[in-house]
Each structure stands twice: as C-alpha cells, then as structure tokens.
Image (spheres, rainbow, N blue to C red):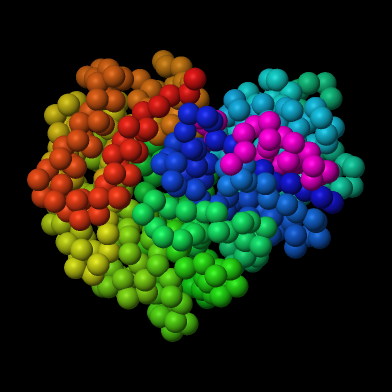
C-alpha cells in the first residue's frame, strides 16, 4: 500500500519543530530545521512490512498549506499519517481535513498534543484515527487494517470515531522494550542535505539512542511521550546507525535527541569508544542533565567528537527544583549542588565542549526573587549559550493537572517562549519581561560581549532570534 507520512508546514509566524518538548513542539530559530526523525522511524517499520512509503516534509520543501496539499495528493496515497504540535494544531488539522475530503482515504494524526487530547481532535471530522503514544507499531497495525479493509476495533494506542459518532479510546499500547529490534530510520526517504542547525556548516541529522527519562519534571513532555523508565538501544545498534548516516548518507553533524543522553555512563563510554574505533569523523551534540555527567564521561565524549551539550538547569531556587525539576541540581541533603554544577561546566570548557543552559521561568509559586536566583546561577556557570523558556503546562503533565480546572489553555499559544498566564506573584506580561531580562543580562555582560564579538555572525543570529522569540499566532 502507498503511505505518505507528513510533516506539515509551520505556521506563517514562526518555524515549529514538532519533535521538541516531548513531541508537543516548539517555536524555534528559522535557521533550525531538524529532520522528521519520528516519521523516519515509522517509515522504516512500514517498509519492513512491505509498504511503499514516502515522507513529505513541507518545511524542508518550503511549502505552505495549499502547496503541501497539492504535493501530497499528487502522491496518490491510500493512507496518510500527519505529525502535529500544540501551537500548529489548528493548521495541522485543517490540512488533514482537506486531504481527507479530497482523497477519500483514511487520515491519521500523531503527536503528544493529540495523544493527550484525543477526543477534541474529532470535533470537526478532520481525521479518522489518532495515534497515541509511540507510533511505530501502532501505525503499522493501522496500515495492515486499512490494507485489509478492516475497521480499527482493538488496535492498541488508537482513538477513532465509530459509525454512531462515539469516539472509541482503545487501550494504551505498551512502550517498545526491544529498541534494537527497530530498523534504522529511513533516511533514504529524506533529502538529508536540507536539514541544518544554527552555527553549523553543512547539513545535520538527528539520532534517538534511548527513550524515557526518570527525572519526572512537572512540566516535561518527554516523560509523557516516552515514559519514566529509561529504555536504551545498545551501543552496537547506535553505532550501526552512525556508520550508516556517515558512510552511506555522507552526514557528519549529529544531534542526539535523547531526553537525558548520559543516563547510563558505561553505555556512553562504550559508544564513544566505538566512534573512535570506527574512525567516524563526526561532530555531535546532545541534551543531558548535570547529575549524569562527570569529568571522565565528558573526556570520552570530547574524544569522540562531542562539541556541544545542552544541560537542564531549569531554576536556581531550591524549592522550585525540589517541587518541579526532578531535583536535577540538588545534592543528597536537597541543597543546590553548586560545586557539581561548576565542575561540569568547567570540565566541558576544558575539553572544548560548548554548553547551553536550559532555564524555565514562570512556575506557579515563583517570585521575582526566585527568578533572580536563576539569573545568578546562570551567570555563575557562564555557559556558552542560555535558553530561557516560559513554563508551559502541556496537557497530561503533572503541571497541567495542578493548574487545569481553574485555567483555560489555548494550544495555539504554546510556543515554548510565550508566557500563557501569570501566577500569584507575576502577571504573564511580567514573566515575559523576565525572560527578556534574562537574555539581556546574560549577553550584555562585558566578558560575554567580548566573547561573542569573536564570532560576530553568530552573535548577529542570536540577536535576530531574540526579536523573533515572542511572536504570537495570528
């Protein structure tokens, strides 16, 4: 059967990267374009089952909704599966609706937003089925049912509308334990030269070497999409993917998209040794947590080509760290483990690894004084880059459960940078201004300005991004 997997166009106001924030998506720098890795994983499973698969990436092709609709129809598919994000959901559903109407074939939608609000997705007859949770085996089973002209009764991990209009929510599909049994993502279906990362010369690609995060931060979508249990591919299986992308697809820049890349240090040491042994000339980066890093694992990573790490700092306030942030920066006595934080950032600098600190502003109980503690911590750590995000209550997260019932949420505003609401201490506008202040304070320090001016092109790009962060959907 011919199946088209779709990464829809971004809204006109900004680029959205649907794989970020645990699949809820996030507004990003226009110069950032990640490949639709989740769709590539789904495609490889479908191809292994004998289907003819195409991946349509509207952003990579520079298409708007109308041009995307025409391109997808031209593929003459028998099944379409569309990725989605919170902030682009209305536009994503409009595309689904148009395809469903014109093609007269089943249309499925996946993503964390639709996973946790599946009933709402059927209100305007936009789709036939919602794929909840990890999509690979669920989409494969949907394709099998469609090919056999059977209904979706009993397909785990789906929500669908019955003939009488009732929405049926099938049981959850268990998370995939044996990740090594998944085929390598279908990069041959992507135009790999189109994908890029700000400040990186040449194309980039992404790799997901593990799934799940045990830290359970109240605001994090990754634990919803991937679970609290850490599941990992073997170093040998990951190395096979790195060899394929480097030697077959001629790619040298890799962004690991694991929630916490260094959860198992022994595994990272083994993977890094394999990269060195195979003489893979890769430049790569990852996201991780301070408590899973130390000097020796950073040394191994640097020797294997790691040039950048993004670290979840989140907050400098102990109470917020304890309540919302999985105790990421706390020691055994639940105090801020400043010495460990400083050691990690200093060691990264020593080994030539750039750092980015992820920080959140706008927790329910956060005061301006607590925000000041975050600013002071970031200045003490002095990363190469900083990212301040607005705390966002994505559906299904513990934070959403805390706030829901007393507040309404507009999914179109969930960009990751736009403050959606205030708290008892700060209004939404004041939280937004604190985010701006954080950027200004960090980058206007004399020492930082001198460092930035060593690369004026990159600095100009950061300034341009600052002025586009706070755009809103029309």
Q: Is residue 76 magenta?
A: yes
The relative height of residue 331 versus residue 428 in the rendered view (above or below) is below
The relative height of residue 407 versus residue 359 in the rendered view (above or below) is above
Residue 89 falls in image quadrant: top right
Task: List x then y, in percent, for residue 254.
Answer: 46, 62
Q: In this rendering, would 285 be left or right of 39? A: left
Task: List x then y, in percent, for residue 437.
Answer: 20, 31
Residue 342 falls in image quadrant: bottom left
The relative height of residue 204 versus residue 148 in the rendered view (above or below) is below
Residue reaching furthest front?
Answer: 457
Identify the residue shown where x is 72% and y is 38%: 108
Q: In this rendering, would 11 be left or right of 290? A: right
Instruction: Count up the numbered dots.
Output: 0
Identify the residue shown where x is 10% and y is 50%: 447
Identify the residue shown where x is 37% and y is 32%: 468
| Segment colored magenta | 62-88
Q: In this rendering, would 462 be left or right of 343? A: right
Task: List x then y, in percent, for residue 26.
Answer: 45, 38
The relative height of residue 180 versus residue 373 in the rendered view (above or below) is below
């Amino acid at each position: 059967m011919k199946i088209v997997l779709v990464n829809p166009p971004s809204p006109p106001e900004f680029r959205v990267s649907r794989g970020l924030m645990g699949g809820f998506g996030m507004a990003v720098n226009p110069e950032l374009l990640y490949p639709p890795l989740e769709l590539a994983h789904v495609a490889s499973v479908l191809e292994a089952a004998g289907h003819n698969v195409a991946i349509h990436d509207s952003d990579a092709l520079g298409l708007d909704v109308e041009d995307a609709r025409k391109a997808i129809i031209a593929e003459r598919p028998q099944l379409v599966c569309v990725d989605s994000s919170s902030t682009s959901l209305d536009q994503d559903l409009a595309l689904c609706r148009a395809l469903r109407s014109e093609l007269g074939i089943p249309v499925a939608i996946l993503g964390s937003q639709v996973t946790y609000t599946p009933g709402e997705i059927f209100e305007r007859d936009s789709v036939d089925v919602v794929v909840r949770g990890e999509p690979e085996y669920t989409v494969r089973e949907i394709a099998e049912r469609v090919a056999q002209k059977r209904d979706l009764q009993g397909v785990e991990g789906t929500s669908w509308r019955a003939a009488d209009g009732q929405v049926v929510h099938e049981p959850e599909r268990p998370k995939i334990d044996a990740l090594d049994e998944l085929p390598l993502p279908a990069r041959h279906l992507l135009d790999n030269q189109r994908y890029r990362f700000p400040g990186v010369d040449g194309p980039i690609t992404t790799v997901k070497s593990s799934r799940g995060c045990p830290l359970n931060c109240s605001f994090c979508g990754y634990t919803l999409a991937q679970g609290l249990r850490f599941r990992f591919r073997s170093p040998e299986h990951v190395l096979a993917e790195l060899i394929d992308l480097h030697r077959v697809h001629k790619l040298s820049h890799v962004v690991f998209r694991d929630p916490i890349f260094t959860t198992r240090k022994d595994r990272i040491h083994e993977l890094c040794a394999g990269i060195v042994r195979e003489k893979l000339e890769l430049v790569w980066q990852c996201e991780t947590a301070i408590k899973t890093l130390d000097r020796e694992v950073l040394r191994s990573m640097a020797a294997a080509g790691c040039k950048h790490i993004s670290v979840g700092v989140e907050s400098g306030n102990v109470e917020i760290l304890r309540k919302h942030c999985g105790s990421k920066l706390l020691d055994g006595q639940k105090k801020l483990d400043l010495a460990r934080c400083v050691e990690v950032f200093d060691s990264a600098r020593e080994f030539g690894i750039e750092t980015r600190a992820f920080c959140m502003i706008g927790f329910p109980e956060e005061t301006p004084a607590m925000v000041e503690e975050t600013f002071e911590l970031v200045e003490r750590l002095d990363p190469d880059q900083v990212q301040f995000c607005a705390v966002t209550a994505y559906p299904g997260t513990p934070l959403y459960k805390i706030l829901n019932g007393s507040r309404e949420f507009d999914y179109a505003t969930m960009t990751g940078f736009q403050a959606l609401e205030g708290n008892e201490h700060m209004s939404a506008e004041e939280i937004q201004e604190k985010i701006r202040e954080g950027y200004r304070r960090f980058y206007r320090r004399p020492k930082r300005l001198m460092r930035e001016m060593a690369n004026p092109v990159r600095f100009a790009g950061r300034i341009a991004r600052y002025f586009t962060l706070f755009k809103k959907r029309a």
